[in-house]
Amino acid sequence: MVTLSGQSSSQTFAPLTQPQIRAQSEALLAYAGRTVPVVFSGFPHLDGWYTVGSPGADESTWRAHTSIEWALDLVQVGRDADVEIESGLVGGNRVHVSAATAELWHAPAVGASAYMVGSSVPGFVDRVSATGTVRVYRALPAASNPRWGSPAVAALGGAAQVSVDGDVLTGTTSADTPADWAVDNGLVRVQPRTSAGTFRVTSYLVSGWGTPKVFDVKRNGVSLGAASHVTVVRNDPCEVVVRLTWDHAPSRSTVDVAVKRGARHVSLTLQQANVAGPWRIDDNGGGGVVSDQLAASGYIERQPSDVDGNFWVIGTTVAAAAAGTFGLQGSAPSSVMPCYVGVVRSGQFAQNGDTAAQVNAQYLGTPGETERVISR
């Protein structure tokens, strides 16, 4: 067992703000009981996977100055060569009205090795992300629980993450700042609107992020606009989920925004407590020429390349019709509509595994996922 302790303070040469220091202590407490990769600067022989035990943080505040004394125990589970990760996959075939075929897929961390899915040998597509090249395994057999290895130093490569107020979060405790949050997996990034629409989606290119594209969510034909609240629902390397809430006085609407490691799409769940009309999602009047595959496969694709050379796709699992130039609307009023926004990287030159039909199939085949560290 390794015991670590230290202090964070607003009275330093490079001070953090009081909210940042308190956020650090919340992040520390969120690690309780979790098994995490740990890298020790100058002590590489200690690198490995540890379970965090007994984290604690004591705050001292005097006027505008705050300090936190913290401590935690690390119980070693194993070194890199001793352990591997098992991904428990559940589902992978969303109920949908179209004739499209779902594709079960999975993405381990960047640089993962010895990937095993029983006796099968799955295909894959490599996707360049902000933190390295993510290998996405495709067409997995049903009821798969892949096992794979990763050194602690690389275990968060390609991870999904959520930021609030500019700080990457650990755990789900966060400030309620609906105008300042972001979720990304190094391939797609979602941020709140600036002056129009509901949110922005950006695709990673080759060496940097592209131009944000505005999307709008409408309830009974009226834009939801800026959210009233933001809540972090899930925050794991394999997937993050944030919930946006709008106050309709007295009713409410919510949009869950989910991003998985390795995905080229952003999953959305639109919910309204009081069914005022059908749900609609579009590109806020961006226009262009589209390929309407809603009836056959449940998606619509904007094909003229944008300034980054990408096509974009919007899809859903329920019956829907084209709305505007690039958008869709549920065929009937409903309390819930699952849908997604995806990017076709490189447009007409997209590699196999990245076309609109394949991104749609991967949305339909997105499994629920948990991870655990086990002995080899």
Image (cartoon, rainbow, N blue to C red):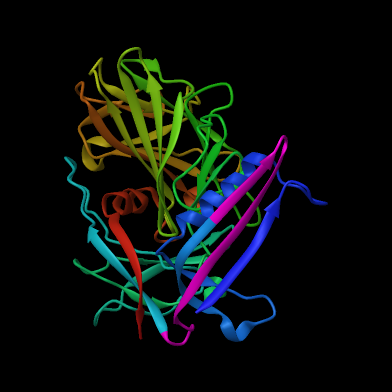
Span highlighted in magenta in the image: 57-82
Q: Quadrant of the C terminus?
A: bottom left
Q: Residue furthest top?
A: 249
Is there any visible trace of residue 354 in the rendered image? yes
In the image, what residue occupies the spot 34% across and 29% down? Answer: 254
- In this view, the residue in front, 356 or 138, is 138
Residue 63 highlighted magenta (yes or no)? yes
Instruction: Say if 225 sits above or below 306 in the image.
Output: above
Left of 335 or right of it: where is 214? Answer: right
- In this view, the residue in front, 254 or 115, is 254
Instruction: Say if 39 sits above or below 64 in the image.
Output: below
What is the x, y in percent for residue 325? 41, 25
What is the x, y in percent for residue 91? 21, 57
Which picture quadrant has residue 270? top left
What is the x, y in percent for residue 345? 50, 51
What is the x, y in percent for residue 232? 43, 42
Which picture quadrant has residue 306? top right
- In this view, the residue in front, 165 or 285, is 165
Residue 74 highlighted magenta (yes or no)? yes
Which picture quadrant has residue 241? top left
Left of 108 or right of it: where is 119? Answer: left
